[in-house]
Amino acid sequence: MTSFATKAFCRVERMCHHLPVVLNTFLVFSITGEVSYLVMVEAPLDPDQKKTEWSTWWKAVHLLAQYFMLINICWNALLFTTISPSIKGVFLGGEGMGQGWRYCYTCETHTPPRCSHCYDCNVCVLRRDHHCVFFGRCVGFRNYRYFLSCLLFMWSGLLYATLMNAEVFIVILKEGVTVHSVLLLLIPWIMLVSGQVSARAFAFAFIADTCVVGFLLVSAFFFFHLFLMFRGQTTREWYSNRRPYSLGLLGNLRQSLGRRWYICWLSPLIPSPLPGDGITFKVTGSLDPTR
């Protein structure tokens, strides 16, 4: 009985571990599908413009922009979750150890400054920032660029989707701010279950609400991490109000995004610095990007 309970618990734990990723994927593709419908069917608002050449180009540009953002979101998220930020197979021998190095008894290895053990991933992570519960992966030196790029395109996509869903809010509120319209925007699930709205109205209201809430949350995460990157800090260092590894604005950008930091956000194919590739551990224990 104990063995069955243990196996059942492990299966539930694995499902819960992947649940945020599945939910994020569902929301991203749902929002993309809804915005594509708005572009192809509902827009432009003027019926006389729907069959004009201008309307065709307008739709093509919108579809190209939104699928460019979708591909970058998925691609960066995939690289972020598949590239291991751990220290395995990365470090120098004993002579490379200096001030600030520690010994991790769980991983049974020496670790440099800014490296800490993640008990969710069960591994030490180089320049560990935090464990991202939405992707089930630690944010570290090797995958930070993809994490930030994913946030950038999620922020851009949600801003675009929110603006496109302005028409939904206009339609809902066209008869004024009534109890029905307010409840539809705030609690669309209850309105659907109680039979007050159709499934179509619920879907539009729910996705419009998701765009607004998601945009606010992603904006907070994105600009916070931009702030940390500019300062050369990790989240852990920000909590402790420390900034010992700042290399200046340009140096911090290169350390996080690579030599081509100014265009790396266009595609995940553009190289970014990796541990052991232009990275040395000084005797002082600081990371010195020499790229």
Image: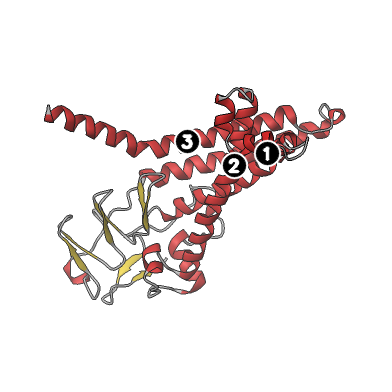
* Whole-percent x, y for residue 276 in the image: 31, 60
In this view, the mark in front (1 or 3)? 1
Report, in whole angstroms, how far the alpha carbon at label 1 lies from the one at label 2: 8 Å
Q: Nearer the viewer, residue 289 or 225?
A: 225
Q: Look at label 3 and name its amino acid.
A: Thr
Report, in whole angstroms, how far the alpha carbon at label 2 lies from the one at label 3: 14 Å
Query: Residue 211 vs residue 19: left or right?
Result: right
Near mark 3 (Cα within 10 A), the count class, few <14, some 14-19 or many ≥20, is: few
Q: Look at label 2 and name its amino acid.
A: Cys
Q: Earlier in the sequence, mark 1 or mark 2?
A: 1
| Residue found 23% across the figure and 33% down from its top | 9
Q: Is residue 2 visible?
A: yes
Cβ atoms under marks 1 and 2 closer than 8 Å: yes
Which residue bears the numbered disc 1? 165
User: What secondary structure is marked by label 1?
Assistant: loop
| Residue found 77% across the figure and 36% down from its top | 174
* Whole-percent x, y for residue 255 in the image: 43, 64
- What is the quadrant of the N terminus in the image? top left
Residue reaching furthest right?
48
| Residue found 65% across the figure and 31% down from its top | 36
Which residue bears the numbered disc 3? 25
Residue 161: which quarter of the image? top right
Q: Earlier in the sequence, mark 1 or mark 3?
A: 3
Q: Look at label 1 and name its amino acid.
A: Asn
Cβ atoms under marks 1 and 3 closer than 8 Å: no
Query: Residue 98 vs residue 84: left or right?
Result: left
Q: Is residue 290 visible?
A: no
Q: Nearer the viewer, residue 12 or 123?
A: 12
Q: Nearer the viewer, residue 161 or 279?
A: 161
In this view, the mark in front (2 or 3)? 2
